[in-house]
Image (spheres, coloured by chain):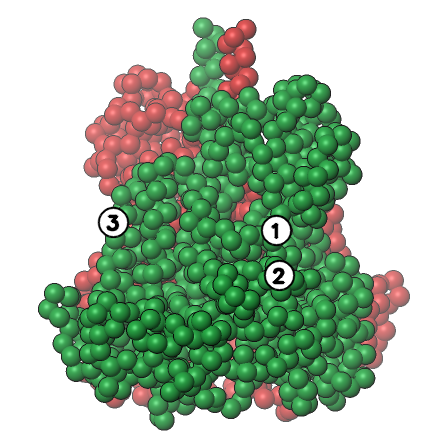
Chain colours: A red, B green
Amino acid sequence: MRMKRALITLWLVLSAAAPARAEDGYDLWLRYRPVTDAARLAEYRAAVTQLVVDGDSPTLRAARDELRTGLRGLLGADVPLSASATRDGAVIVGTPASSRTIGALGLGDALRAVGREGYVVRATRVGGRRAIVVAANSDVGALYGAFRFLRQLQTYGTLANLAVASAPKIQLRLLNHWDNLNRSVERGYAGHSLWAWDTLPDASNPRYRDYARANASIGINGAVLTNVNANARILTPEYLAKVAALANVFRPYGVRVYLTARFSAPIEIGGLKTADPLDPAVRAWWKAKIDSIYALIPDFGGFTVKANSEGQPGPQDYHRTHADGANMFAEALAPHGGVVMWRAFVYSNEVPVDRVKQAYTEFKPLDGQFRDNAFVQVKNGPLDFQPREPFSPLFGAMPKTPLMMEFQVTKEYLGQDTHLVYLGQEFEEVLRSDTWAKGKGSTVAKVIDGSLHGYARTGIAGVSNIGDDRNWTGSQFNQANWYAYGRLAWDPEMSASDIADDWLRMTFTNDPSFVRAVKAMMKTSREAVVNYMTPLGLAHIMATGHHYGPGPWVGGPNTRMRADQTPTYFHRADSLGLGFDRTATGSNALEQYAPPIRARWGNQRTVPDSVLLWFHHVGWTERLPATHGRPLWDELVARYNAGVDSVRAMQRTWDAQRGKVDDERFRDVQSFLAIQEKEARWWRDAALTYFQSFSHLPIPARYEQPAHPLQYYLQVRCPANRDKPRCDNVP
Amino acid sequence: MRMKRALITLWLVLSAAAPARAEDGYDLWLRYRPVTDAARLAEYRAAVTQLVVDGDSPTLRAARDELRTGLRGLLGADVPLSASATRDGAVIVGTPASSRTIGALGLGDALRAVGREGYVVRATRVGGRRAIVVAANSDVGALYGAFRFLRQLQTYGTLANLAVASAPKIQLRLLNHWDNLNRSVERGYAGHSLWAWDTLPDASNPRYRDYARANASIGINGAVLTNVNANARILTPEYLAKVAALANVFRPYGVRVYLTARFSAPIEIGGLKTADPLDPAVRAWWKAKIDSIYALIPDFGGFTVKANSEGQPGPQDYHRTHADGANMFAEALAPHGGVVMWRAFVYSNEVPVDRVKQAYTEFKPLDGQFRDNAFVQVKNGPLDFQPREPFSPLFGAMPKTPLMMEFQVTKEYLGQDTHLVYLGQEFEEVLRSDTWAKGKGSTVAKVIDGSLHGYARTGIAGVSNIGDDRNWTGSQFNQANWYAYGRLAWDPEMSASDIADDWLRMTFTNDPSFVRAVKAMMKTSREAVVNYMTPLGLAHIMATGHHYGPGPWVGGPNTRMRADQTPTYFHRADSLGLGFDRTATGSNALEQYAPPIRARWGNQRTVPDSVLLWFHHVGWTERLPATHGRPLWDELVARYNAGVDSVRAMQRTWDAQRGKVDDERFRDVQSFLAIQEKEARWWRDAALTYFQSFSHLPIPARYEQPAHPLQYYLQVRCPANRDKPRCDNVP
């Protein structure tokens, strides 16, 4: 009786001791909440009774700490550390070098197959006792393995006969932070930059470590800290000391730091009169600068460079080529093992015939001219991170140059912080696109993972959506895009749907009804935004500058912008029809693709609806297979309405999850979906009333009619907010 | 045995269930961690066994929720709710109107004495059983009482014979947020504005409520949401809907919302041709606008107005007086119970003989011309929130006009986010200053609490240091300034030291050795910053614009700034000496003070060292009582060095607390102190080498010599960061 009372008291004391904090999203997918499935919990408790981490490097300590924290949370009990496996249920973590136990397990072949960063996680026996071994060839491999093991528990997977081996298919898996030194983030919608340059290097911040943890948990192994529109000051000794402080925090988690190099830095901070990449003094300056960086940061990764694009300085200022510029950096970085990533996103000073042809035109001739440690980094599409674009033709065009993929994880053109859009679907679509570079099956994934052309070096970059907002990414569901990017960087052939499954279980709950419904919602979310913003291959009809909200009417001679940055340039609406003729009768951008693609996309009878208006100017009443045989106008109306309907369906799906997730995040998501529904209507009605001014066709009565006349939408003002614009009088 | 095992398992499960989060400061002084003093814990558990909250208003629900959360954390057990006191240990909360029990307790006299917002908390007997009653005349009084009761436990005070009665001495206790609609914060050093205008009113954020809770816990009852440099858009229907959403969250916590009114709004958003306050159309526009605000927000508080200052529009643009302007608002607000707070901080378009005389010169003649519901809001000193100033002479000069105090809680001129400066000492110094307006004892506190002149309305405003940084205020110790401001607003005669005591116990730990040492550190911190920045009555020698770091050399004809915003204007260093002669032989600003003050401060033999150079130009080698008989130069050197020494002593004190507080906040504070020490040296060396260029006197060898020549300090660049400037090459 006394005992029972004590028990109850204890329950009360402990269950109440720490006032519960609101679920604010800070923990991301590393929440480690108690396992609520009793059978699984029993299985896990039996299978995990002690933790053996041989070795004491910072990275193995990180693995050990993560396992302790994670298992404590998941199992509801501290799993004791042990020097060796003394009973059934040991989890043994390490490398053959760090651990004699692991060395003795005969994992040689298995480990050879997973390379430097891969891991093997398997149920086995050690000295006759049941054990789970997390083995790798490097400490960071062991850390990745630890996260993989935890994921097994987080997603309520069985540990019986556990046998997982995994290795990344891409070597450099980077986040690109477009973060400025004043802590603003270009195209960032989640607060300030995480990097508190003002208090670095003196003060640290627990977020630096949590950022590195989150990255390591999905295999991201590098961070370009600064904006591609670069500031030379980052290369001054004062700032490099700050960079070194961050590198020190990230290092145990396998995350190397990279910077952006401003091409004109030798002039701006070096006192030189030129930045000509073939000038010996310039080359000497960069070499000395790079040597000084490595003196501070021995594992510094290298540079991302945006040059001769959107007004940035570059080698063309000195009549040199992009390869000349890249090779200058590559040469100075090579002795240290660093790389240069040269962006193919170029905007020359003249308005081209067709904006989307430019990267190919400039870079294709340079194939083979880049040094070994130089990448060309190519955006997924030929334009600029639209809701949907065809893949960039460069992926099929540079067999002798390692190409890096550049995805945009931050949703610059896709509703920014508030709209729920799961980008996993978009990334997957791009990676699975077939370039036909070496015949059928030459997918973009195989190009960038090096298997198609035998690249010695491989890389991928995602433009980060991370800021200092409490939930890191501006909304709960934007976290999924960080997560999906990391998982696909590790394995570009993974299924976006499976990734969403893992993410939902780890981030919200393993409740199967929740996972099923919300995963389906995520999967439709990308098609929804395409439909209510830019259906049928439309692109870049967002309001200019901030890219938030519709602005298809912007353009023409009275606009003080270059034509190829305005919507009217891209959609080409006129009294006859809509769309950009990029076939041979038009700009012939199509010729940049392989013949089988040209044949299919160039023919109005075979072009898929997804790129119809990207490649064709189609008459308002034309009926095509891509319009399901309906007149284009009717199909356009149907698509815009389908986009709005999808958002409403997402709302209904989410509303049905009440009680399955915490109230805080439930309401958070719910209120953002309400904003999205309102803005999807705004998009639909603004775009349709605008296009209607050309088509002069009615919106069939079975659809919701626009809430206002076109004039109303023209007058919606969207002042640029600090991070994100918000528009007045959105209907 | 089985039971014992179950007990142990339970302990393990529960103590580990939620992975511990880093102590990041989010919880402020409302941490409610378990009571670790066993005797006190036993006392509290015996005294607190059930919770009786009669009534179900939103405010009483807030009180009940706070008590449940707080007691669960402190006592480690849920305290059950009960409809009535059924055993010893009930805590009974309510008003005579909400609770028959309280009505029957005979508290009539006690409650009458504490007014609308006050409370009575006392140990008593109800139906023969021991109980603690938290009683008030209003629901918000009961909420304040609940926080007061929790504070008793948080600070490990006894509950035996508990008998507390308290009422605020000032009616309006406001925070002024200088927050812009783009979420930047003028003079904010803690991230973005809390108000997410972009997602309001659709989305809420748990921080809105936590902000209101924190304010209620210290008695703050109003928030002016917007910058005094106002944007008229806040008065559009779209933004007013957002304001109303915030007001709805704050209302249960007794926090009313106020806005800033841009004087020219009738032109900018009203389509009128004038904003002349005597123009009938203008008056009608404001009346209609104000009526529309109250339709949305029935308890809207009113407006703060900055007019004809630093380029802001105002009534003088139409040859009207400040009183004309204020009365226009007051008249329109009066039917709704609203007030206008008219700032006396004015900067006319001409450079005055002496900047510090201006507010008095402009406002003194208007005394008695303001309507009943108009305040004049006066900064604590005549200049602008310096580390030290004499009190503003207006406090002794407007007996017929209710004056509000304006303190700056954000440390614009005092090291901003990083320097540890406890402003409680500064606020106390100002409030205890004697104006002599009605003879000895006419303290500033008695002016603003209305007791000296019998003001019917009283108010106080603190310029907020709050932003969306996780710790709210940019540093852990900046939280103390929010806290101290609130407590002093409730009772301007409280001791800053006692407030620091409470704050430390609630925020960190009740460990007596910690509280003693750190409280002493906090108390010396303000004098430290005065010494290393502006000792002996110096002022405004910060670098211009961002006000961070030393810039005593800025000024003179080559500066493109008005003279009265530059350091050389204020310090008046020349070959003879240092300081601004504000006696009858100079600007005679001294004449704005009462005769006994004039006599003391005007005489070099009796002036206190704190305002020596504020009122006197003193020769470099003059020896005065205020310089302890040393030559001025020697005293100046001694003071600057004492400032640095104090910071080092603060570092030692803090270092000795390792282990007494959590590691996260320990390191956080430690690293900021390291920055402060470095910057204190920078201040000292920059100021002394600069002043030395006038005095041509050596720095005695017993002191640290400047690290660099003056030329070095002149070249330190401090680019304006987004929120805060940080300077390159700080020595």
Q: Position of residue B565 (x, y in %)?
A: 43, 82
In this rendering, which labeled residue sits more in front, label 2 or label 1?
2
User: Does residue B369 lie above or below B298 as drawn?
Assistant: below
Q: Kindly report the distance in space between the C-alpha atoms of the residues bearing marks 2 and 1.
A: 12 Å
* Disc nearer the start of the sequence (1/3): 1
Location of mark 3 (residue): B652
In this rendering, which labeled residue sits more in front, label 1 or label 3?
1
Location of mark 2 (residue): B450
Secondary structure at numbered mark 1: loop
Name the image quarter holding the C terminus of chain A: bottom right
State left or right for residue A480 relative to residue B295: left
Residue at 46% in and 21% down: B11
Q: Kindly report the distance in space between the C-alpha atoms of the residues bearing marks 1 and 3.
A: 38 Å
User: Does residue A462 lie above or below A253 as drawn?
Assistant: below
Mark 3 crowdedness (10 Å alpha carbons): few <14, some 14-19, many ≥20: some
Q: Position of residue B333 (x, y in %)?
A: 76, 69
- Residue type at numbered disc 1: Pro
Nearer to us in this view, A585 or B686: B686
Q: Which chain is indicated by disc 3? A: B
Q: Kindly report the distance in space between the C-alpha atoms of the residues bearing marks 3 and 2.
A: 43 Å
Residue at 65% in and 71% down: B400
Location of mark 1 (residue): B168
Question: Of all residues shown, which one is farthest toward the right?
Answer: A701
* Disc nearer the start of the sequence (2/1): 1
